[in-house]
Amino acid sequence: METYYKPEDLSKFEDIGKDSPKLTQKFFEYYGAVFAEGELTEREKSLIALAVAHTVQCPYCIDAYTQDCLEKGSNMAEMTEAVHVATAIRGGASLVHGVQMRNIAEKITM
Amino acid sequence: MLNEHASNISSIEHSGIEPFSRTLSRHGLQLNRNNTHTLQVNLGIRCNQTCGHCHLNAGPGRKENMDPGIIREIISYAQRSKFETIDITGGAPELNPNIGMMIEEVFSLCPRIMLRSNLSALNDGRREYLFELLKAHRIVIVASFPSLNEAQTDSQRGDRIFQTTIDALKKLNAMGYGHEGSGLELSLVSNPTGAFLPPNQAQTEKRFRQVLKRKWGIVFNNLFNFANVPLGRFRQWLVETNNLDNYMGKLYSSFNPCSVDGLMCRSLVSVSWDGYLYDCDFNLARELFMGGHKIHVSEMSGPPPPHSHIATADHCYTCTAGSGFT
């Protein structure tokens, strides 16, 4: 069956550097620095990444960070809550724009 | 138990992973013994649990249990060898009816005796004498505790095991185990609950210390992270769930040549319930005799000599992954 997304393509991520090696190197150095332990632990950052992956709906990131969360000591309960955080923010972002709707409607309505 | 060695060589090469011995050679390394200071004794593979990650296929139906004759051979071996540590393991070593005799005889033979425990066998209500014996002889308890999450723990170890473990840890704390300065050492061992590698040990220990104290008032001395070894029941699960190739790939790609120097097999000798010697408990599960030769504990005049060869196979990639797991 033909599909745009193939799990084995995740391992080819670094191939993107073949035609822009300097930019790719900068990107992966930054990426590694972002996920290193800082004020937040590696586990906390991995859970944030998992939530963001669901927000942008990137199947590569969902695959990578599901595994990474488990390898950082997380579990299904925590990871599910993280997905709900993403859901609440996305849903909330739509809902809060309802304030705009109400402002406009109230202005032109008797 | 299956002799997996030959069949796994072909499956490894098919999946693109070179044999462990070849990886060592490619890095200019050899795996030989240093001074052997630890004697690991497997009292048998009878167990009250059937954990999913078990490399030995231990369980309630297993009959392999060390008899008093072999125990006496091991005590004699310990007397002539002057080990620094005796590490008692299983299955569930508490289920061997002669464990009390073993502890009473060996505690004066070396400065450090360890008991690896799943805690549910120890705390089944029928072994109060064993609690007292462990405390009296200051036996180090190394307890299995894979996760702070109940569902995650029970998925690996069985229903209600998480709560049973918490109850046992509280009991051990009440006896003095795990408290700074008590002389009663309690360590935790965490294994992943699936086909993935463990997290950073220091970070895990920090988190477990905070959460166990906050939620249950439990304290402990040390925590160790062990990766799951692709043998026994765990290997069977990996095959059945189509995870073996990926998991072996993770172990292989994480090979760290710097971990070889500190591998436990370099300083440990393992004895099975029937008295035969192995370089480690994983080789025991694989029926890979010490140095590739079948030798009984009664034939040993002392510890295996330094520089002697250690038998290896694909499961050795587990202990050499990342910072190593020993």
Image: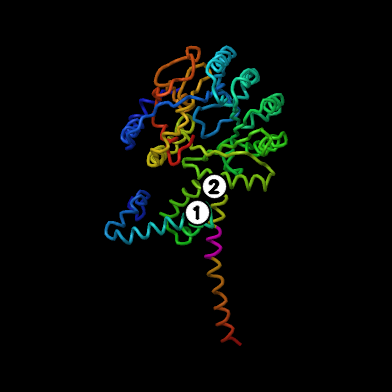
Three-letter amino acid code of the residue under disc 1: Glu
Q: Position of residue B88 (x, y in %)?
A: 57, 25
Residue A59 vertical position relative to residue B92 in the rendered view, above or below: below
| Foreground residue among B40 and B153 | B40
| Residue B82 lies in the magenta stretch | no
Which residue occupies 49% across, 40% down?
B194
| Disc 2, SS | helix
| Residue A87 lies in the magenta stretch | yes
The residue indicated by pointer 1 is A37
* Count of marks placed on residues: 2
Which residue occupies 38% across, 50% down?
A7
Which residue occupies 36% across, 27% down?
B7
The answer to whether marks 1 and 2 sit on the same chain is no
- Main SS category, magenta section: helix
Residue B87 visible in the snapshot: yes
Q: Position of residue B152 (x, y in %)?
A: 57, 43
| Range shown magenta | A84-90
Q: Which mark is residue B203?
A: 2
Q: Position of residue B216 (x, y in %)?
A: 68, 44
| Disc 1, SS | loop
Picture quarter containing residue B135? top right
Three-letter amino acid code of the residue under disc 2: Gln
Residue B224 vertical position relative to residue A82 in the rendered view, above or below: above
Chain identifier of the residue bearing label 2 in the image: B
| Foreground residue among A104 and B105 | B105
| Label 1 packing within 10 angstroms: few (<14), some (14-19), many (20+) | few
